[in-house]
Image (cartoon, rainbow, N blue to C red):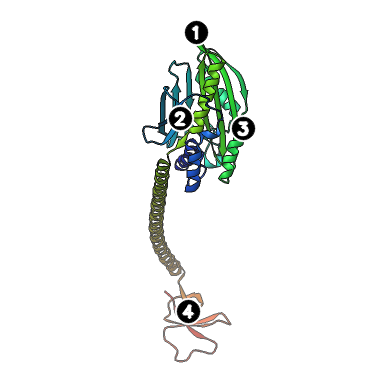
């Protein structure tokens, strides 16, 4: 299950954070989405007379973005929990305006599915993946904003409004890929104070759910001063978002790496299945061998019992004959028979002739050459 979950996060979360690519298997669509840029869907606006410069993510050259000239820019592509996260912070020279996008600590989410053994709040073994019901953007980013900025003095949320333009744009991006998603948007407007300075801020976020995975992406700013600073922050953030572009060569390498990892996982799964099958076969052979040994021992034991019982029966018969002989001796009787029937007669004769119809017999020490009419010769049995 863990391998399946991690793969889903990579395919869904990476695609969204990289440029809204909904299908890593379609190279043409990937290139098109990288050109358009993921964050271009989030905001619109004019940069006015502000001059911008293009900066490239320094670690892997994964993406580039426009930032105001002379501002301090820290952008990065981070690999965490089996996925990638694009994050950035851009600060004005006077420190009054800070732009940001992404959050390295924001996990991806899987919908609860008891049939798959996934329960809300369970420990997945991956801190960047949680099992949680889908949360609408207004609720999710209200909680997020309060958690991120709520420790400041006089913090309060001024307004939370849906961003219908963002919703329509994201739906259009999914439709281009022939996919559907549950999309929820929200702009959270807030203010706070720190070190005697008042700040205004905005967190603009989107919650997107497709199949069993859902993610939350965000962008925003904080600004000190009045409405003019907030207006400048809005313009700079719009340019930053609209200019975001993934490096196509990096994207291709990443797709190839993901394909190789997928193939390796497939081979590992096949090897595990073969090993499991072999182990099952060995267990079955061991069980059969054990069963055969058991049956053989049972047959040997049964034969031993049969032999002992036959010996006992023979002994009993011998004892019965001895007892009968003793009784016959006392009664002066002899047991005679013709192989099918027997009777008791007076002992002391060598030969006996019996008339079965009349129930009479003749005892003689000499043998008749011809048996009398109606008689046949019977012999002593023992």
Mark 2, residue position: 66
Mark 3, residue position: 165
Of tags 4 and 2, the one toward the viewer is: 2
Which numbered circle lies on residue 351? none
Under circle 2, the secondary element is strand
Whether pointer 4 and pointer 2 mark residues with C-beta atoms closer than 8 Å, the reply is no
Q: Looking at the image, can residue 59 be seen?
A: yes
Q: Residue at x 59, y 36 (%)?
A: 169
> Quarter of the image holding residue 191?
top right
Residue 195 left/right relative to 176: left
Label 2 to label 1: alpha-carbon separation: 32 Å
Of pointers 3 and 4, the one earlier in the residue sequence:
3
Under circle 3, the secondary element is helix
Label 3 to label 1: alpha-carbon separation: 36 Å
Of pointers 4 and 1, the one earlier in the residue sequence:
1
Under circle 4, the secondary element is loop
Relative image position of residue 257 (x, y in whole percent): 39, 44
Mark 1, residue position: 196
Mark 4, residue position: 339
Q: Residue at x 42, y 83 (%)?
A: 365
């Amino acid at each position: 299950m863990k391998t399946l979950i991690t793969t889903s996060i990579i395919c869904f979360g990476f695609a969204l954070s990289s440029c809204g690519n909904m299908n890593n298997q379609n190279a043409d669509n990937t290139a098109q989405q990288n050109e358009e840029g993921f964050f271009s869907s989030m905001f619109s606006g004019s940069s006015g007379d502000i001059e911008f410069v293009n900066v490239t993510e320094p670690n892997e050259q994964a993406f580039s973005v426009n930032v105001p000239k002379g501002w301090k820019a820290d952008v990065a592509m981070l690999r965490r929990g089996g996925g990638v996260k694009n994050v950035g912070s851009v600060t004005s020279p006077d420190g009054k305006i800070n732009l940001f996008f992404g959050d390295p600590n924001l996990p991806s989410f899987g919908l609860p599915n008891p049939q798959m053994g996934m329960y809300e709040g369970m420990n997945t073994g991956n801190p960047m993946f949680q099992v949680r019901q889908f949360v609408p953007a207004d609720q999710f980013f209200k909680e997020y904003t309060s958690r991120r900025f709520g420790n400041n003095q006089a913090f309060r949320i001024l307004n939370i409004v849906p961003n219908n333009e963002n919703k329509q744009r994201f739906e259009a991006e999914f439709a281009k890929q022939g996919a559907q998603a549950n999309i929820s948007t929200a702009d959270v407007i807030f203010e706070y104070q720190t070190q005697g300075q008042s700040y205004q801020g905005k967190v603009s976020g989107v919650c997107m759910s497709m199949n069993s995975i859902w993610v939350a992406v965000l962008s925003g700013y904080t600004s000190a001063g009045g409405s003019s600073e907030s207006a400048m922050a809005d313009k700079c953030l719009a340019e930053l978002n609209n200019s975001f572009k993934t490096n196509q060569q990096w994207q291709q390498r990443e797709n190839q790496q993901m394909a190789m990892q997928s193939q390796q996982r497939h081979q590992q799964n096949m090897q595990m299945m073969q090993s499991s099958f072999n182990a099952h076969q060995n267990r079955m052979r061991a069980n059969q061998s054990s069963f055969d040994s058991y049956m053989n021992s049972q047959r040997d034991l049964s034969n031993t019992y049969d032999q002992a019982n036959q010996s006992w029966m023979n002994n009993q018969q011998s004892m019965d004959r001895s007892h009968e002989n003793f009784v016959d001796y006392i009664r002066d009787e002899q047991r005679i028979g013709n192989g099918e029937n027997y009777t008791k007669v007076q002992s002391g004769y060598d030969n006996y002739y019996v008339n079965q119809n009349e129930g009479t017999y003749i005892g003689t020490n000499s043998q008749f050459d011809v048996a009398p009419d109606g008689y046949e010769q019977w012999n002593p049995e023992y």
